[in-house]
Amino acid sequence: MMTIMSSQFQPVLDRIASEIAGTPARGRPADYIPALASRDPRSFGMAVAEPDGTVYGVGDWREPFSTQSITKVFTLALDLAREGAELWEHVGREPSGNPFNSLIQLEYENGIPRNPFINAGALVVTDRLHSRTGDAAGELLRFLQAESDNPRLSFDAEVAASEARHGDRNAALAHFMASYGNIGNPVPELLDQYFRQCSITASCADLALATTFLARHGIRADGTRLLSRSQAKQVNAVMLTCGTYDAAGDFAYRVGLPGKSGVGGGIIAVVPGRCTLCVWSPGLDERGNSVAGVAALDRFTTLTGLSVF
Ligand code: GLN
């Protein structure tokens, strides 16, 4: 079995960045949220964080980008920490096999979304966190600031407004679930929370650090416990099976780690007990996952042997 020392992370990252730089196919930035469309698909950054807070990085690893659906991991953790297993009566934990913004399963599954990482499921989680805290997006932002030790993390008002203007599909999902009694807050208030949540801007370094509580089996950066060991295992498991939507099988096959993507081009991944990763490159494939991001994580687990399998 291959073993890798921490000191080997930097050469591995450097090697991956130079391999990626030689790859022409990079996908296309998301254009259904106009504020994201202008990012350069050749941008590439990658960071690895260790449980003690040491971070290694390469390329644009300190460049802020739009976190989008990556935030769904953190709202899930924050809500699960508060309400525990009751959450699973309102959202499932099965892969959907459908695009992240699909409406199709919701009617025949009575307004209960398949999992917390498709948009419908994330709306339910944010709604429940909002009911408990009165400020779901603020709660999330403060958590990310604390875990990344970066108080400058913030919402991007332009991205949130852009998404709100083009948010008919998310509005449809929220109204439809409300008709089944699975949304507690007024839909416009929930959408405002959700769009602000998705608009948070952070770098690979910030997000790799913010994810380390999952590599530490639920323990936050300050040593306090957010999730039980078992809950941290559950979040990692749902990331593995549902974190990259209808490409989760292919992601598990290629990367072999719990991961979560966002249409801003970022992907976070966890090697439980060992390290966390965040990679960013804005060009997406047709399922909404970063082309260079998946390729880089694939190379990382291949080169290091660090995978859950
Ligand atoms: N804000 C985006 C949306 O709701 C998030 C989707 C994503 O990153 N996959 O459509």
Image: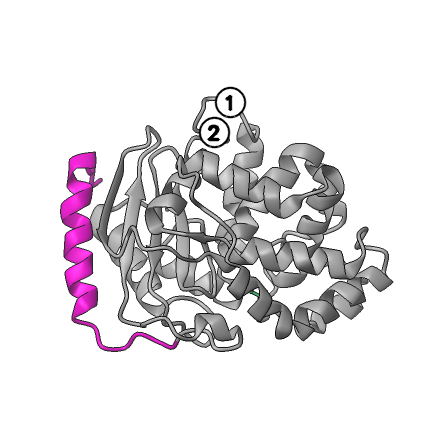
The amino acid type of the residue labelled 1 equals Thr
* Depicted 272 relative to depicted 168: above or below: above
Residue under the point 38% across and 33% down: 273
As drawn, is 109 to the left or to the right of 164? right
Q: Give the percent coordinates (x, y) of residue 172.
A: 74, 71
Residue for point 30% across, 66% down = 292
| Neighbours of disc 2 within 10 Å: few (<14), some (14-19), many (20+) | many
Q: In terms of depth relative to the viewer, which is nearer, 303 or 26?
A: 26
Up the image or down, 216 lies above or below 205; here it is: above
Q: Label 1: which residue?
A: 224
Residue 272 figure quarter: top left
Taking depth in this image into account, of 243 and 256 the one nearest to the observer is 243
CA neighbours of label 1 inside 10 A, class few (<14), some (14 to 19), many (20+):
few
Mark 1 vs 2: CB contact within 8 A: yes
Ligand 1 resides in the quarter of the picture at: bottom right
Image quarter for residue 162?
bottom right
Q: In this rendering, does residue 308 appear at all?
A: no
Q: Residue at x 63, y 52 (%)?
A: 93
Cα separation between marks 1 and 2? 5 Å
Q: Is residue 63 visible?
A: yes
Q: Which mark is residue 220?
A: 2
Residue sitting at x 79%, y 67%: 176
Q: Is mark 1 within 8 Å of ligand 1?
A: no
Mark 2: amino acid: Arg
Q: Secondary structure at mark 1?
A: loop
x and y percentages locating residue 133 in the rendered image: 70, 38
Query: Which part of the image, by quadrant, shows the N terminus?
Result: top left
Mark 2 lies on a secondary structure that is loop
Segment tinted magenta in the rendering: 1-28
301 horizontally vs 37: left or right = left
Q: Is residue 26 magenta?
A: yes
